[in-house]
Amino acid sequence: MTLRIDPDRVEETAKELYVRALKVLPPDIKRGFDRLASRETDATAQSVLGIMVRNIAVAEQTDNLLCQDTGIPIYNVTIGRDVVVDGVALKAAIRRGCERATREHPLRSSVVHPLTRRNEHTSCGEGIPVIHVDFSEAFDGLRIEMIPKGSGSENNSWLRMAVPAEGIDAIKRFVVDCVLDAGGKTCPPTIVGVGVGGTADLCVHLAKRAATRPLETACADAEGAALERELSAAVNMLGVGPQGLGGDATAFAVHVELAATHITMNPVAVNMQCHSARRASAHFTDTGVTYGF
């Protein structure tokens, strides 16, 4: 059965997703807090984790934002089989929904012109919201994921064009150095996203995708998954701790995403997500729209 996507419904959904993402923390992140707290050995860090958890609960109970930073709005669209959609209309609808969320809710617009710093108070601008469109045979229908990426985490982004002869050790050192450099600026505990391979721009995109991937998921590549486990353990031995105040809970996890690359280079990128790892999603099917994370 062919599914035709209505742009008006996309607009309303894009609006709803932005507000949902800012107000409700995904369950996997809450479970991540529980795991970190159960292993934390530092008293101050235990107290800081408790304050974070309490802040999240109060925000949700009072229908407030989890964080004042409404971030750069990112929409990831995945189109499944048997879907008919006007791509131009789809992107325009997402932009309208993003604008309406900002004006009607209302939300603080964090988006400005890069040179004049002018704020149109729409959370939109040239190239913003970021809209990625991909295709999948894994499901029917259309899925929209919304991620508000705050500047505290986004400012902690790095790229290194490593020399292949340096091997995997160069990747490990780079990730550890980046986490130490970020310290408490990313509001840890974080999700450390690592991209390896591809071109420079693809590598950075992979790191972003890794940083915003749900917890309790693993890299599809076996070697990448092994690197995730090793780096997750290493990062939580650095002593940065929650909010950079010391302790074991520096990161929920290190996530890795890979792409093939050229024989003469080995790009590695790091992008971080803060402890308020916000996201929301909607799945369009012939029975309607279902919201989730």
Image (spheres, rainbow, N blue to C red):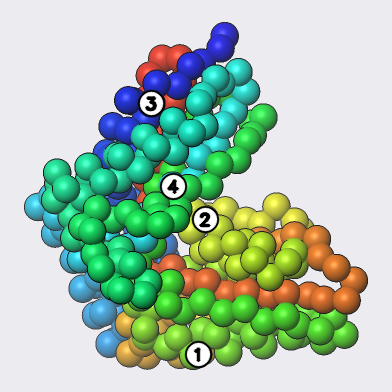
Disc 2 target residue: 213
**Visible residue check, residue 174:** yes
Percent across and percent down for residue 171 are: 71, 80
Looking at the rendered structure, the kind of residue marked 3 is Pro
Of mark 4 and mark 2, the one earlier in the sequence is 4
Q: How far apart are the alpha carbons under marks 3 and 1? A: 45 Å
- Image-based side of 260 in relation to 183, left or right: right
Q: Nearer the viewer, residue 87 or 28?
A: 87
Q: Nearer the viewer, residue 227 or 5?
A: 5
- Report crowding for label 1: few under 14, some 14 to 19, many 20 or more residues within 10 A (C-alpha): some
Query: In the rendered image of this protein, does residue 58 appear above or below residue 172?
Result: above
Element type where label 4 sits in the image: strand
Looking at the rendered structure, the kind of residue marked 2 is Arg
Disc 1 target residue: 180
The answer to whether marks 3 and 1 mark residues whose Cβ atoms lie closer than 8 Å is: no
Q: Nearer the viewer, residue 212 or 205?
A: 205
Disc 3 target residue: 7
Q: How far apart are the alpha carbons under marks 1 and 2? A: 22 Å
Percent across and percent down for residue 139 are: 59, 28
Query: In the rendered image of this protein, does residue 276 appear above or below residue 155?
Result: above
Q: How far apart are the alpha carbons under marks 3 and 4? A: 15 Å
Percent across and percent down for residue 121 are: 21, 57
Of mark 3 and mark 4, the one earlier in the sequence is 3
Element type where label 2 sits in the image: loop
Disc 4 target residue: 75
Q: How far apart are the alpha carbons under marks 4 and 2? A: 13 Å
**Visible residue check, residue 276:** no
- Image-based side of 227 in relation to 265, left or right: left
